[in-house]
Amino acid sequence: MKSNVFTAKISRKEVDNVEETIEIIIGNMPIEVFTMEDQRFLEEECFYKIQLLPQIFDEIVINKIDKPLKEIMRVEKSISYYLKGLYYADEQIIDVGFKLDLSEHELHDFSFLDKKYIQIFISRFDLEVISN
């Protein structure tokens, strides 16, 4: 079974004139994502079943935060984000308002942060459309 599968609305294509980026909305959270999907077949304001893949290209940057926040915060005008939410170390899941599986990044060294609010840096989100 695939993880990180959601229903998302495509709100904008070719964000900032970058052909490989689109903006989606999951719940009420807008997220700019990278995709290799052929955008000619994607329609704005339509909902799709997607797989959202958080990517970390460099060193893992993860910190405990004091406030109980659940959000996805874009880093300036980049496609990088800080995820803030409740972390479940056994499953390597962060609840940012919806649950994201981070197990691909092998966060075993951070089990001491279990059931604590954290912030983790994500280089970008990759998106794969499963169906419409």
Image: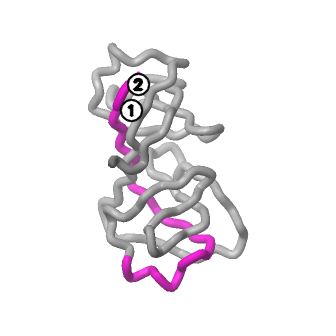
Q: Residues within 10 Å of mark 2 (few under 14, many from 20)?
A: some
Q: Residues within 10 Å of mark 1 (few under 14, many from 20)?
A: many
User: Mark 1 is on which residue type?
Assistant: Thr
User: Mark 2 is on which residue type?
Assistant: Glu
Task: Say which residue label 2 marks.
Answer: 14
Please tell me whether residue 58 is drawn above or below residue 112 in the rendered image: above
When asked about the image quadrant of residue 85, the answer is bottom right
In the current view of this chain or complex, which residue is farthest to the right? 67
When asked about the image quadrant of residue 42, the answer is top left
Please tell me whether residue 15 is drawn above or below residue 77 in the rendered image: above
Q: Element under label 1?
A: strand
When asked about the image quadrant of residue 128, the answer is top left
Q: Quadrant of the C terminus?
A: top left
Task: Give the x, y percent position of residue 118.
Answer: 57, 70
Mark 2 or 1 closer to N-term?
2
Q: How is the image coloured?
A: one colour
Magenta stretch prevailing secondary structure:
strand
- Any magenta on residue 116? yes
Please tell me whether residue 58 is drawn above or below residue 50 in the rendered image: below
Q: Which residue is at 33% across, 48% downward? A: 1
Q: Which residue is at 40% across, 61% downward? A: 102
- Given contact means CB atoms under 8 Å apart, are the residues at marks 2 and 1 in contact? yes
Q: Which residue is at 72% across, 70% downward? A: 67
Task: Give the x, y percent position of residue 17.
Answer: 40, 25
Q: Element under label 2?
A: loop
- Any magenta on residue 124? yes
Which residue is more in the foreground, 83 or 98? 98
Which residue is more in the foreground, 122 or 50? 50
Task: Say which residue label 1 marks.
Answer: 21
Task: Give the x, y percent position of residue 92.
Answer: 44, 68
Magenta segment range? 108-132
Horizontal relation, residue 76 to residue 71: left or right? left
